[in-house]
Image (cartoon, helix red, strand yellow):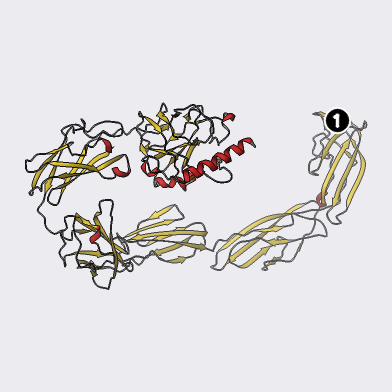
Amino acid sequence: MRKQFFLLLLNVLCFHLAQAQPCTTLGQTPQTAFPVCGNTVFTQNTVPICSNGTIIAPGCESGGSPYPDYNPYWYKFTCYQSGSLNFTISPLASDEDYDWLLFDITGLPPSAVYSTPSAIVTGNWAGTYGPTGASPNGVTFIQCASDPADNKPSFARSPNLIIGHDYILLISHFTNTQSGYTLSFNGGTAVITDPTEPHFANARAVCDGTTMYVKLNKKMKCRTLAPDGSDFSINTTLTSIISASGIGCSSGFDTDSLILTLNNPLPPGNYILTIKNGIDGNTLRDNCDRTIPVGENKPVSVFPIFPTPMDSLTKPGCAPNSLELVFRKPIRCSSIAPDGTDFTVSGPYPVTVTGASGNCGISGLSNKITVQLSAPMQVAGNFQIRLNIGSDGTTILDECGQPSIPGSMVNFLVSDTVSADFNFGLLYGCKSDTINYSHDGRNGVNSWLWTFDNMQTSTLQNVQKIYNNFGQKQTRLIVSNGVCRDTIRKDIFLDNFLKAAFESSPFVCPQDKAIFLDKSVGNILNWTWDFGNGSISNLQSPPPQSYTPQLSKYNVPVKLTITNNIGCQDSVIQKILVIDNCFIAVPSAFTPNGDGLNDYLYPINAYKSKELTFTVYNRFGQRIFYTNDWTKKWDGSFKGQGADPGTYVWILSYINTDTNLRVEQKGTSVLIK
């Protein structure tokens, strides 16, 4: 109870304090997480009090609700080699409680940590003071919050990271003070240090050359960029670089895109942009403090300013409901009329443009414009997309403010949609069936892939398939005309399977009749029975048959021949045992001497019995033979040795199958040698 009250009180107190102060410091939101280099020790001397929202720590919901991310800091990294991850969070004060959760956010936005519990890899939410983290000897579950006096385990088992996956680590300061901590990544076999050396990727001049965009090959620390642009020089006396800024540096710690500003325009021509140590004494550094080599350079061209023409169109796919225009120069997103009136489409049938938009980022520029159509274009034809003066009073403007020329256009081709529907013809046979498959090839189909029963395939337009077994057959066809594609699956049932079968009485006693039950399968039109007693029948359910007993039992073959709707036949033969005597009796004597006459003691002719038991005792009352199968006979031996000659007592018990009454018999038999 003390622990629950402590947690509830602390939870309420922290929640109200944090709720009033949303996190604004860089690193305290998932979107602004610190980039991690595996050999860096992070020191946070103070932790601002704030909260962004609630986090679901599996099994650790307090009072039925998820925890707020009290006073958080976030750290992001990528796994470059799979393996285990070890790290330690060490509070700067001894009576401080730090908790943490590790998320796999591969393919997810950082904000998904608040709504995707499945992204949690592991964590520790103990209330224990002192260091916490992940180690080889940690617990294999997320330790939930507790009274610090309980001293619950504060380390989780080292998680195994997956190469190529992106991770984000939350460190939450559960103790509501501003005292800080250190974070170190120590040991483990996973590699979280980016092995890529930092380099200058490319650069381009914008418009009159007073602005240049620089692309780096990886993220670099924003604070290592000299704001005065002194990290760069250009090989001309006509102008100089006066400032530099990193795109996204106002909301993060690193960037791979820079904007350089020059004090004068550059005339059209080719120039060289070189990186050097800036006023801060270094070139740009990556997150592991590796620098771009001094002297690296890239060519930069300044082109004459002229209107950007309609350049190219991404090849339309199947039944396009939008078109993607590509421009050599970035287009100002603000100049694209949202209603799509900057563009019209003409061709063999009407196409209506309903909207247009760019792939716009922080820069407000886009090299691509997506033109939305009112409906998919499903019929083939040659079309043109034309540039107009839109509802905003102008055509689109490039990054230099130059309007594109109205009336310019790009031709494009739309392909027909296709259908994989196919026809088939059946040729039935007695031993095999033939199916002729065909596809009409309409709308330019030039590729076929047939798959039969998920096994055999064919790439022909028309296929003949022979089946030697009948029943359900699955056929799938994929067709394509190089642009459009369609798939269909059909189940075809070959219903001419034919199998003759019947059930009958296994034996016939004198005065009894044998009964026959047809169990054949197929589209049967005719049954022919030959009962082996001189009688035949063409009925599916023939009448019971009588058989004449002889001096000894004998077998009679009964044959059934069936004929189906296409004239195919199948036959089956079963033998019926005709019994000369079905009276159950035990011999009064037997001679187990191996001469083939009266060698065994057993209940003779027990054909009409069930639940039978037969037991033999010697004169001392000792049971020397037992069976519940009347065909298993006593051979006059006991424990592997021949029994003594003399009189033996037997007990026979069974249910008569005619009367369904229990019969109990007792008697004696003499063993004679």
Query: Which residue is at 84% across, 43% downward?
Result: 613
Amino acid on which the number 1 mark rests in the picture: Ala
Question: Height in image: 137 above or below 61?
Answer: above
Q: Label 1: which residue?
A: 643
Query: Which residue is at 86% across, 51% downward?
Result: 583
Q: Classify mark 1: residues with Cα within 10 Å, few (<14), some (14-19) or many (20+).
A: some
Q: Quadrant of the N terminus?
A: top right
| 180 with respect to 303 (left or right) | right
Q: Quadrant of the C terminus?
A: top right
Write down the quadrant of residue 539 in the picture.
Answer: bottom right
Query: Which residue is at 57% across, 63% downward?
Result: 569
Q: Position of residue 473 (x, y in %)?
A: 49, 59
Q: Position of residue 52 (x, y in %)?
A: 44, 45
Question: Height in image: 575 above or below 395?
Answer: above
Question: Height in image: 240 above or below 567?
Answer: above
- Observer-nearest residue: 86 or 133? 133
| 436 with respect to 395 (left or right) | right
Q: Position of residue 139 (x, y in %)?
A: 53, 31
| 554 with respect to 189 (left or right) | right
Write down the quadrant of residue 77 in the picture.
Answer: top left
- Observer-nearest residue: 434 or 284? 284
Residue lying at the far bottom of the rendered structure: 349
| 436 with respect to 270 (left or right) | right
Query: Which residue is at 44% across, 63% downward?
Result: 435
Number of labels in the image equals 1
